[in-house]
Image: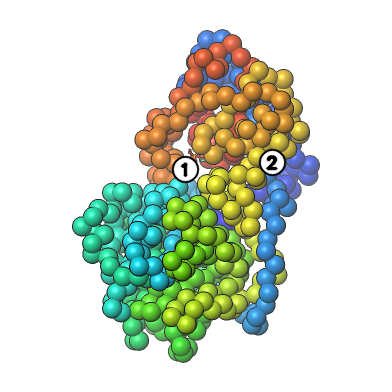
Amino acid sequence: MAAAKAASISSLYLQSHPSPPNPTSIFSLFLSQNPPKTLLPSQNLHCSHLLSLTCTQHLLHPPTLKTQSPAFSSNKQHPDGRSIDYDDDEKPREECGVVGIYGDPEPLDSAIWPPRAQHRGQEGAGIVCVQDNVLQSVTGVGLVSEVFNQSKLDQLPGDLAIGHVRYSTAGSSMLKNVQPFVAGYRFGSVGVAHNGNLVNYGSLRAMLEENGSIFNTSSDTEVVLHLIAISKARPFLLRIVDACEQLEGAYSMVFVTQDKLVAVRDPHGFRPLVMGRRSNGSVVFASETCALDLIEATYEREVFPGEVVVVDKEGVQSLCLMAHPQPKQCIFEHIYFALPNSVVFGRSVYESRRVFGEILATEAPVECDVVIAVPDSGVVAALGYAGKAGVPFQQGLIRSHYVGRTFIEPSQKIRDFGVKLKLSPVRAVLEGKRVVVVDDSIVRGLRLRKLFGC
Ligand SMILES: O=P(O)(O)OC[C@H]1O[C@H](OP(=O)(O)OP(=O)(O)O)[C@H](O)[C@@H]1O
Ligand SMILES: NC(=O)CC[C@H](N)C(=O)O
């Protein structure tokens, strides 16, 4: 699983560096051996230091979880090695944006807007709406604006909906894997949208196929629908609980049935999921609070790790099915996954990034004339660095608005191309100056290698 991989990379890092290394020295060395030559102006540029942020989990304060039911025993089987269609590398890949709305007279107005926050997934988008007990679905490959036009929206009436933007983690980037998925089971229909990655997907799928299940997709998310279908639990809600108890890994999910909206978050709370309300009384779930802002919904709270929240005509009901004493929130949400105007894991992303920059300025002070950011995600940290260091922040790199996020693209070729087109230097800011360049992180190293021609 990507989150586990990210965690193990950082713990490996911490093990081999008992006290954090000084990023200044690492990057001074890096730059002195690899003088900038590609995108930055070649003459009279003294790029003194490139600073990247290292972040610590203790900056985040997880919400305390009240246990309302006994802990469940999770499936400890190992994946059976069946081929999961992962990306061409093994970097953290776990975003995706989910949204769910109950009781909104204009659900599409609501459902369509949160996924427009495309920063969590650019490969595919979909919406499932419920009207007269029928689940109608529209999904497509590409951006929300490419998938949905007015005639598509007209196919989706109803006051109960879920939506998804996809960043593939398991299952290739193709139409059949675009969510939400909808399935009919013995007592009705159910739709699901998932943010996360199920690490025991392989063994669950093998078990289900052994017992006769036929799969339509190569996505890990589909196992959840099969587990619901074979569950003997009653009522429907307990089938979801039953299915989730068998999952290992990250899952923030929204389900829709003929009359219910259900939100579930895994017991570790790897990925965010928040709940809000609009002034018309409708209840909204979304991956990030920035999606609530888009539809003028008020943030109420997080869906807690291990919690199941059910919304139907009876109101909002909360069930804590899986207790876990130690939440494991993915630090990358605060580093660059989430937008800075979101509150994630109960903490402002903007504030985290600003403080990361301040810490960097304190731990790695550098004589410089100007601080610049690698936009977009490096901007707030660079502001924090500049503020603390008392050095002017300037826009030394301009980002093209026509290239989306590059790390999120499904293949190396597309990422390379995007990185090449995305950032351009501002000669007036950089020429002849001692420049500190702040980025939020180095993951594949592609972006900074391209930027500095290394
Ligand atoms: O894997 P690497 O090459 O080291 O790149 C990692 C960077 O990718 C992301 O930027 P991206 O340009 O995708 O998004 P952004 O516009 O939000 O910064 C993010 O900000 C990471 O720092
Ligand atoms: N990025 C995600 O959260 C992906 C969800 C799911 N694992 C998929 O690949 O579609």
Image vertical order of residue 446 relative to residue 196, above or below: above
Dots 1, 2 in contact, CB < 8 A: no
Point out residue 17 in the picture as x, y percentages from the top left corner. Answer: 75, 42
Q: CA distance from mark 1 to mark 2?
A: 24 Å
Q: Secondary structure at mark 2?
A: helix
Quarter where residue 183 is shown: bottom left
Front residue of this view, candidates 130 and 227: 130
Would residue 305 be found to the left or right of residue 312 on screen? right
Are there few (<14), some (14-19), or many (20+) residues within 10 Å of tag 2? many
Residue 407, disc: 1
Scheme by which the image is coloured: rainbow
Find the residue positioned furthest to the front: 279
Front residue of this view, candidates 438 and 411: 438
**Residue in the image at 64% along x and 23% along y:** 392
**Amino acid at the residue labelled 1:** Phe
Front residue of this view, candidates 171 and 304: 304
- Report the quarter where the N terminus lies: bottom right
Point out residue 316 in the picture as x, y percentages from the top left corner. Answer: 51, 76
Q: Secondary structure at mark 1?
A: loop
Residue marked by disc 2: 355
Front residue of this view, candidates 159 and 13: 159
Mark closer to the observer (1, 2): 2
Image vertical order of residue 166 relative to residue 229, above or below: above
Find the residue positioned furthest to the left: 151
Point out residue 280 in the picture as x, y percentages from the top left corner. Answer: 43, 66
Find out if the beta carbon at label 1 lies less than 8 Å from the nearest ligand 1 atom: yes
